[in-house]
Image (spheres, rainbow, N blue to C red):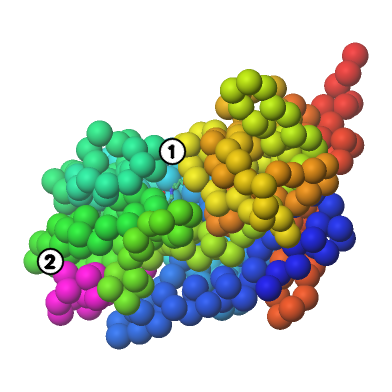
């Protein structure tokens, strides 16, 4: 049991807590599920890019899936070796591509023909061979929230099968490109296995076609997307996930790569916030807390649900909106949820806050980013300081005229 009260007394609120032991359990469960084949789990750094979180996963054996050179450099700083780092994303800049090639990472994931030409040019400029993979858009509906669905041709991600084939042929001809991988990622917070299996089938067929053209794909990257528990979702079991992928590969000799973010870190995280006031009008009860949309934007952005508990209070329950101090009507954590009556300084815990929460936070309303704390082996330790006013103005102060 985590002593939320003691931790909020020690570190103040708002605050993020991450249970590192939980992250270990999740990583091991996934690795174990893929045991029958060669596999590499590349943690999607965007989910939670705190260096200590990345290092924890790196120490367990994970690689990193990065979407900017900043994330690539975080992975390096956390001690993840170059041969386990991949670089994805629809819009990479020349200097990012160049740096990734020079740092000799495992591969760069391409999402368009135009990008293939750029990567070839950058590889030539630094006189190196760039290992690449191509993100295929299998055009399959992942059945998740439209904002986090990525595997349909109406989405900006990847290229269709025919284009991919052409790109592989082109890459094979180039002395500066080495096509070693193939990739798909159809969306996030996936709770249905069928679209994943179908996508894997489509992509595995392409790998077989490529083999016939003497293009040997070594890395079969199935993306991320495994859903987690926010509310009452039925989840995909890691074992079933692995078996579904295996069933599409048959005798193909590939290393299976996956890029989970949320699955590894999401449920490990808690967001702690304290009640400032309650106020009621003729329509509504509002519980106003010290955390806000700038700290955790998922409810405002996606109408996402995060379970909220009031620590040590269970009585006098009625409907309430939990809202923050930011000047936006969209600044809420929950609407019309059943919540016990609260008083000043009561502590609220938002669950499943380990993924896409801190990483999507901002300084809106000149609110400092909050502190982050790791829990491991019964101990707690600070892994990111709370930002103060000086931190927030550091890059602009010198320019006041
Ligand atoms: N690989 C690729 C290419 C991705 O685009 C993503 C996530 C992942 C892996 C990791 O997906 P995961 O395993 O975490 O589902 N901000 C949204 C989620 C955006 C996901 C973007 N891509 C949210 O708060 O729900």
Confirm whether the magenta stretch covers residue 251: yes
Left or right position of 191 against 9:
left
Q: Residue at x 74, y 78 (%)?
A: 378
Mark 1 closeness class: few <14, some 14–19, many ≥20 residues within 10 Å: few
- On screen, residue 357 above or below 367: below
Q: Which residue is mark 1?
A: 91
The foreground one among 134 and 31 is 31
Q: Residue furthest front?
A: 316
- Residue for point 46% across, 63% down: 263
- Does label 2 point to a residue whose CB lies under 8 Å from ligand 1? no
Give the mark, 2 or 1, whose residue is nearer the N terminus.
1
Q: Residue at x 15, y 62 (%)?
A: 201
Tell me if residue 58 can be seen.
no
Picture coordinates of residue 362, whole percent (x, y): 67, 36
Q: Quadrant of residue 360?
A: top right
Above or below, 114 against 133 in this view is above
Residue 23: quadrant of the picture: bottom right
Q: Measured from the top left, where is residue 46 in percent x and y?
A: 54, 51
Magenta segment includes 253: yes
From the viewer's perspective, is 137 left or right of 235?
left
Q: Which residues are magenta?
A: 243-257
Please tell me which residue is depicted at 53% across the width and 77% down the height of the picture: 25
Q: Nearer the viewer, residue 262 or 99?
A: 262
Residue 97 is situated, as x and y percent measured from the top left of the image, at 48, 47
């Amino acid at each position: 049991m985590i002593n939320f009260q003691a931790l909020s007394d020690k570190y103040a609120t708002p605050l993020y807590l991450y249970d590192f032991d939980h992250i270990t359990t999740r990583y091991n469960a996934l690795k174990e599920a893929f045991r029958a084949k060669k596999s590499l789990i590349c943690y999607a750094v965007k989910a939670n890019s705190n260096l200590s979180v990345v290092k924890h996963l790196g120490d367990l054996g994970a690689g990193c899936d990065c979407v900017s050179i900043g994330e690539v450099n975080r992975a390096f700083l956390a001690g993840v070796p170059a041969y386990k780092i991949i670089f994805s994303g629809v819009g990479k800049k020349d200097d990012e591509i160049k740096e990734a090639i020079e740092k000799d990472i495992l591969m760069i994931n391409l999402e368009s023909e135009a990008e293939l030409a750029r990567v070839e040019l950058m590889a030539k400029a630094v006189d190196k061979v760039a290992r690449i993979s191509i993100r295929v858009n299998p055009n399959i509906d992942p059945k998740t929230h439209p904002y986090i669905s990525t595997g349909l041709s109406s989405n900006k991600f990847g290229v269709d099968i025919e284009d991919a084939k052409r790109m592989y042929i082109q890459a094979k001809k180039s002395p500066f490109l080495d096509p070693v991988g193939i990739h798909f990622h159809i969306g996030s917070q996936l709770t249905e296995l069928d679209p994943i299996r179908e996508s894997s089938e489509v992509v595995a067929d392409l790998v077989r076609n490529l083999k016939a053209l003497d293009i040997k794909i070594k890395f079969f990257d199935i993306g991320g997307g495994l859903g987690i528990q926010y509310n009452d979702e039925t989840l995909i079991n890691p074992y079933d996930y692995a078996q579904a992928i295996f069933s599409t590969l048959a005798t193909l000799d590939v290393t299976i790569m996956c890029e989970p973010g949320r699955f590894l870190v999401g449920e490990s995280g808690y967001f702690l916030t304290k009640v400032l006031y309650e106020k009621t009008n003729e329509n509504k009860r509002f519980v106003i807390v010290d955390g806000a949309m700038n700290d955790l934007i998922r409810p405002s952005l996606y109408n996402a649900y995060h379970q909220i508990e009031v620590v040590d209070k269970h009585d006098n329950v009625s409907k309430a909106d939990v809202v923050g101090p930011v000047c936006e009507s969209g600044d809420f954590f929950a609407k019309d949820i059943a919540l016990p009556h609260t008083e000043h300084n009561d502590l609220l815990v938002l669950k499943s806050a380990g993924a896409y929460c801190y990483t999507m936070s901002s300084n809106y309303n000149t609110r400092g980013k909050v502190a982050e704390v790791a829990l491991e082996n019964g101990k707690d330790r600070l892994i990111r300081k709370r930002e103060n006013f000086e931190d927030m103005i550091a890059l602009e102060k010198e320019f006041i005229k």
